[in-house]
Structure formats: structure tokens, C-alpha cells
Image: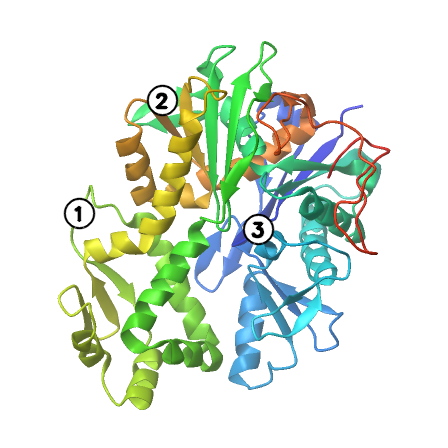
Amino acid sequence: MAPLLVAAIDFGTTYSGWSYSFKHEFELDPTKASTKRWHGDQLVSLKAPTCVLIEPDGETFSAFGYDAENNYTRLAEAEEHEQWYFFKRFKMKLYNEDINRDMKIEDKTGKKLKADIVFSAAIRFLKDDLLKVIQDRIKGSVKPEEISWVLTVPAIWDDGAKQFMRESAENAGISSDKLIMALEPEAAAIYCRFLPMENSGQGDSLSTIKTGSRVMVVDAGGGTVDFAVQEVAENGSMNNIYKASGGDWGGTKVEEAYVKFLEDIIGKDSIDEFKRSNMEDYIFMIRDFEMKKRDVDPLKSEKPVVFRITATLLQLVKQRKGKEIHELIVDSAFDKTVSIKADKLKVDMDVVRNIFKIQIEAIVDHVSNLLDQSTVGDIEAIVLVGGFSNCSLLQQAMNTKFDGHTILVPNDADLAVLNGAVIFGHKPELISQRVSKYTHTGSSSRRKWNRPICNGTNALWRDRDRGRGY
């Protein structure tokens, strides 16, 4: 029986969020889902930073998202933060790692906790937060057995990481028989099947693509960039025809390149001390960069891009280096391309392009390699989704390199995975076939597993009874 309510959690590297829709709402408009607006200082967003703050006992959950960031910065200002555990962007700890139930991950100051405590705390908060909103909306009318939960995971994760997420969700109070795992590019493709697109100013949609046509979905998130090649089946579902692939080329790597650029000017020691002593200002500086990186568009303007540098960083550099930042810029390799006035750092467009260069080239090269594979065949369209897909530099690079292909970008590219997961929960048959990451053929991965997915006494076992590998 179809669930009364589908609730989806998009657990991202940089940002996380939730959406839901009732059965009757889905039947009226599959793309319409209720999504929370998160508030952080002067920011309002449809996702919250993937941050968890845990009390010094290493067990008690304190806060998530913007609240976790703000509470931790207040603790740091009062010099009371050292015993607390602050985890940020920890999802990538599961990528390319040997997974076991006792594995530990480091917080921002190097202290370690068991990974399942941190992941379960984040999922539990998102679940409880969603349920509270639903209960406030409709008093006591939804029973737990009437809710189907969908949790998103990267397609390129190995089965150990996917199973770890499943168990974390179960530890967070989501019943295993009410839990569906959705691969992120698959969820995005489902959403795009229903949604009008913007394509060079003209309306277009995957729903107009004929049966038998093939599309490539590029899910460019904060941590990973996932690629899926799919074929439209006769019943409107999507068949995966090539193995899941991708890499850690997401938006956070661009942020790391920006921080490295600053280190090249003022020194790594200055940045490290800035993070240690002025966490709130460091977070503000990174948020400013995150906003600016979406708006950088050399097609509109070749003017220098202005980034905000807080006054506390200016003072810290003067104390540590005995020089003003403008003097350090003159002494650096950027003396002709970077300048500063008050708290505004003006950076030439060529330098900004270089900050993005490695990640964008990796994405473009991977798309090229996929298009060259004989088993991929002719691609009707390339669909860009995920937060990083909003980057104008990435869109420009894709349009330039693949000018013979249709490049589609949803209006809400950063919500495509989340809203697609809601649709998937209502109609899981929309994905009718998956391809093993270890093969190039069309064999389905919906089979029973009974071998451990990692070595050692804490091996996680595949879900044999339900026929799910994750």
C-alpha cells in the first residue's frame, strides 16, 4: 500500500535538509514538496550546514546546523570549546575508507568519536525536526507506519558506506522496513523527469525525451560529484546503463583552494591561528566565499571579484607578520592581480578561475571519458544538478566543451536530489534497473547478499532478507 506521507532526508557533505509530501499532494503535483527554511544569522536557506555539536561527555547531542556553528563559536570566544566535539562536513569520512562499526572520526580540533554516534545524531535531529513540523501542521493524524522515509547517498560510495548510513538511520529511530535508500543522481534524474528546465533561456524538460533516449546526470554536490548514465524506459522509468562513477571534486574542494590561495599570501600559520581564535569570523569569511562562488560569471563581467576579509584577520596578520596584508600581497606572486582596500580583497578574474580550475577540469574530463565509452552510446542531454552546478564557471566550461550536446540545469538544481527523493519514495518503480559499480554491463544490482562488506570482526552484513545491498 502506498504510504500516506513520504519524508526525505538529503544528508549532504556541506548542507543537509529535508522535504516531505502527502499522497494527495503528490498526486496533484509530483514536484511539489514541503521543504524547511533554515535561519542562520542573516541567512535564510533551504538547507542547513552539515554540522553537529556534541557535549564533552562524547554522547549527548547539543545542536545541528547553524545552531551548532553559532553555539560552538560562542564557546570558542569564551575559551570553553576545547572539551566539546564539533563535527563539520564529516560525510566524506565514509568515502574510500574501510568501514566498520567501531570506526572513529575526528572533529575540527582532532578529537575522536565513534562515527555512528555522529551520523546517527545528525539523522535523528533531521528526522525529529521534520516530524515536529508535520505534527504542528496536522495534529496527531499521521502514524509512524504511514510514513515512508528516504535517505540519499552518493552513487559512488561503496556498499560498506551505504550500509553504514542505513544502520545509522535505523539507530536514529527510522524503522528498517520504512526506509528506502536513494542514490543521489538517480533521485535527481527522477525530479528532472517531471520538471521544466532552463536551457539557454528556453523551456525544456527530460519529460519530453523519447523512450530509448539516454541522458547523463552530473550531480555536483559539496563533497562528491556523481555521474549516472540512464535510459528512458517505455513505462517512463529510468534504467541505469553504466556503472556509477565520480570523485571528490565538489564545491568544498574549491573552498579549500581559496583557503590555500589566502595561505600563499599570509601564511598557513596565520589561517590556522585565525580558525583557532576567531572561528565565528572564519565561518563568516567562508560563507561569503560560498555566496560569491555562485555568482562568478566571466561572461557577464571580467572585473575583479571582491571577497570580504574580516578586521580580526587583518589585525592578526599584522601581529604575527609585522606587516599589513597589502605589503604581503606585494611580496607574493599576486602583486599584480590582487589588491586590498579596508576589508575588501579584490582578485582578478584569472586568479579566481584558477581557484576553480582543478575541480572543473576534473568534472569536464570525466564527462568526456564517459562520452567516449562505447557502452554509453549517444547521449541526448547532460543534466547538471547539485549545489555546485549553480556555479557559472562550471556551466560555462560544460557548454564550451560539449557544445554539441544539450545541457540542462533545473531551476532549483541544489534541491533536485532532495525533491527527487520524495518522488522516489512515492514511486520507487521509477528506477527499474541498477548497474554494478564493478561492471560495464546492464546486470541489475537488486540481488541478495550474504558476504561481509568489510574485513574484521565488526564487518557489516548486507541486508539479505530485504534484498537490498544498502
Indicate which disc, 1 or 2, sits on the residue closer to the N terminus. 2
Could you tell which of marks 1 and 3 lies nearer the N-terminus? 3
Q: Quadrant of residue 177?
A: top right
Discs 2, 3 touching: Cβ within 8 Å: no
Q: Is residue 398 left or right of residue 411?
A: left
Of the residues shown, which amino acid type is indicated by label 1?
Ser
Render colour scheme: rainbow
Q: Which mark is residue 16?
A: 3
Residue 71's label in the rendered image is none
Give the amino acid type for the residue marked by disc 2 in the picture.
Answer: Gly
The image shows residue 441 at horizontal and vertical percentages of 60, 22
The label on residue 301 is 1
Q: Contact, CB < 8 Å: mark 1 with mark 2?
A: no
Q: Look at the image and tell me in which quarter the N terminus lies.
A: top right
Provide residue 46's location: percent of width, then percent of height: 51, 48
- Residue at the spot of label 2: 203
State how many labels appear: 3
